């Protein structure tokens, strides 16, 4: 199956700067400020000025009135890019921004692309409106009239996974416990009190099988990244560029009732495409950022991304394979469950962490010798899936 | 951007060109499925083109109303204030006898009764003069 594609973006584009705003509860700051604050930090990290950016890709923000967030963002930052778009494939947007940004640079549409997102779901919207703004993304005729919370579509997939494969509530809870332990070592994480499996199981049911602590956080926050060609990264003398080795996406349905299988997702195809482009497989990965809107989502993704066989995700997690010393340390910053989840920028935090791991900048959280990393973003009840594979110079 | 006032109202379906017949049918007490004369595909989600073969020879036929629960989730925390008074309620993914899967909610019993593969039967529930929703009860 492994075939050498004639021309891909593998290794052609590098991430040369990363930045993050304060996350969690950040009152009095707009989505544009959160995005711009992260951008300033990413530019400083890259050691370049804002005038050197000629491309901007952003996600949309629920708490912002701007339909063209990337355009409003450029005005806010005071730049006039010649390549820009606001992408919208729900939670998968983060990885698509990296893939498309890399393609744009490789294809000559831009030389230095800022990938950016910011939103204030915690303090910019009331809790009910935050939830409601998310349910607005379901179909107005076929889904919304029944009162379908965001958690519900994901819950029905996890529930069927439990029925088909014997996945247990305790195994789901273990994902939250592991990631909380990770967040406790991450400066600035929103939730850092230790939790146990029992704490998760006793945290109150939201929608079966998900308890409150099986669900991701609601947060404020933004993140930004500077991407440029490998040649330009070298001209700039960037100390440790992190290269984009592969990308893939897959869109299997729009409506949850048209999802081809509730327990196997488009992540299978999106990751296969990314692995083929990168020339590496799941067993080569040293660290991963796995979209974790809910605990069961992680279990299904560990299977679909190829880290363990279908149906064994629960045991894989319970056996310690998603943390240090296991097969694939995942969400080492705490993820959407414990670090922060500000909507579409949420998965950008996974990128921030995986890139920092590959740079060797994670201090006591560092996965020793991490050279290859994968980030998988997804959204809308598994309707949207996007994977990006990143690596150090040694992996080229 | 939605206002707090809008969030208090339950969303109701607004039929469009593709779905007008479905909602009219429900109003009359039947769930209309689209049967493709060219390839035999049956679809619940209404569109003027067969999702399997692209043909446009689609005929509406009433569903038997019989189905099985493929998956479900009992909602304990509402998606916004409009649904708070309904709690708890079971959201169902139902495999209809004719093949298509649809989403709905359980009616005529307690949500705790719902199990995987349970046989269910369509109930057309009128929620206003204009709108009738397809819900399901234990068969």
Image (spheres, helix red, strand yellow):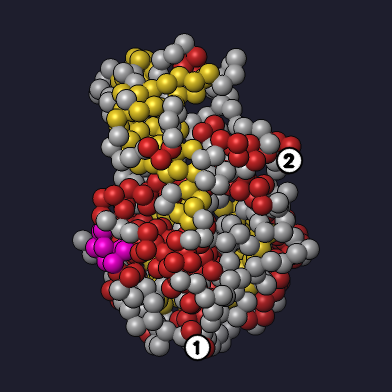
Name the outermost residue toward the right: A28
Residue A394 drawn above or below residue A72: below
Which type of secondary structure does the marked residue at label 1 adopt?
helix
Residue at 38%, 85% (x, y): give it: A394
Residue position for label 2 = B3
Residue A290 drawn above or below residue A358: above
Q: Main secondary structure of the magenta part?
A: loop
As rendered, which of B128 and A386 lies closer to the eye?
Answer: B128
Which type of secondary structure does the marked residue at label 2 adopt?
loop
Q: Position of residue A163 (x, y in %)?
A: 29, 49
Residue A385 drawn above or below residue B70: below
Residue at 37%, 52% (x, y): give it: A158
Q: Which residues are magenta?
A: A308-315
Host chain of mark 2? B
Host chain of mark 1? A
Query: Do the CB atoms of the residues marked 1 and 2 lie less than 8 Å apart?
Result: no
Are discs 1 and 2 located on one and the same chain?
Answer: no
Can residue A181 be seen? Answer: yes
Can residue A279 be seen? Answer: no
Q: Position of residue A73 (x, y in %)?
A: 71, 59
């Amino acid at each position: 199956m492994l075939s050498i594609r004639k021309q891909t973006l593998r290794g052609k584009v590098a991430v040369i700067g990363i930045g993050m705003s304060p996350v969690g509860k950040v009152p009095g700051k707009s989505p544009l400020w959160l995005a711009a604050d992260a951008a300033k930090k990413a530019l400083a990290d890259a050691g370049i000025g804002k005038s050197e950016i000629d491309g901007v890709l952003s996600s949309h923000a629920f708490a912002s009135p701007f339909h063209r967030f990337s355009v409003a963002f450029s005005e806010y930052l005071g730049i006039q890019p010649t390549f820009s778009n606001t992408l919208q494939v729900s939670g998968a947007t983060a990885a698509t921004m990296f893939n498309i940004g890399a393609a744009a640079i490789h294809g000559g549409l831009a030389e230095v692309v800022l990938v950016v997102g910011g939103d204030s779901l915690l303090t910019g919207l009331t809790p009910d409106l935050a939830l409601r703004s998310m349910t607005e993304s379901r179909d107005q005729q076929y889904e919304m009239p029944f009162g379908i919370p965001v958690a519900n579509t994901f819950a029905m997939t996890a529930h069927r996974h439990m029925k088909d494969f014997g996945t247990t509530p305790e195994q789901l809870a273990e994902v939250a416990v592991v990631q909380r332990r990770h967040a406790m070592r991450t400066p600035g994480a929103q939730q850092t009190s230790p939790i146990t499996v029992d704490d998760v199981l006793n945290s109150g049911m939201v929608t079966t099988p998900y308890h409150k602590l099986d669900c991701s956080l609601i947060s404020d926050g933004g993140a930004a990244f500077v991407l440029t060609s490998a040649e330009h990264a070298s001209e700039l003398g960037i100390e440790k560029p992190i290269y984009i080795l592969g990308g893939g996406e897959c869109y299997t349905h729009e409506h949850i009732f048209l999802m081809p299988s509730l327990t196997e997702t488009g992540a299978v195809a999106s990751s296969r495409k990314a692995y083929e482009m990168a020339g590496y497989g799941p067993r080569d990965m040293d660290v991963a950022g796995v979209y974790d809107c809910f605990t069961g989502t992680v279990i299904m993704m560990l299977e679909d991304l190829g880290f363990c066989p279908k149906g064994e995700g629960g045991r894989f997690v319970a056996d310690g394979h998603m943390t240090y010393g296991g097969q694939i340390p995942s969400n080492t910053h705490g993820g959407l469950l414990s670090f922060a989840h500000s909507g579409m920028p949420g998965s950008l935090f996974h990128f921030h962490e995986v890139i920092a791991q590959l740079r060797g900048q994670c201090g006591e959280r560092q996965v020793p010798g991490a050279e290859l990393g994968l980030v998988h973003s997804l959204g809308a009840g598994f309707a949207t899936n996007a994977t990006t594979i990143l690596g150090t110079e040694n992996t080229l | 951007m939605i206002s707090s006032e809008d969030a208090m109202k339950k969303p109701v379906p607004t039929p469009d060109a593709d779905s007008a017949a479905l909602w009219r049918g429900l109003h009359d007490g039947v769930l209309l499925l689209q049967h493709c004369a060219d390839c035999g595909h049956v679809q619940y989600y209404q569109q003027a083109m067969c999702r399997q073969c692209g043909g446009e020879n689609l005929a509406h036929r009433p569903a038997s109303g019989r189905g099985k629960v493929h998956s479900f989730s009992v909602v304990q925390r509402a998606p916004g204030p409009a649904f708070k008074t309904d709690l708890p309620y079971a959201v169902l993914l139902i495999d209809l006898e004719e093949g298509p899967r649809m989403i709905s909610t359980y009616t005529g019993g307690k949500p705790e009764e719902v199990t995987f593969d349970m046989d269910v039967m369509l109930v057309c529930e009128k929620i206003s003069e204009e709108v009738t929703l397809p819900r399901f009860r234990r068969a």
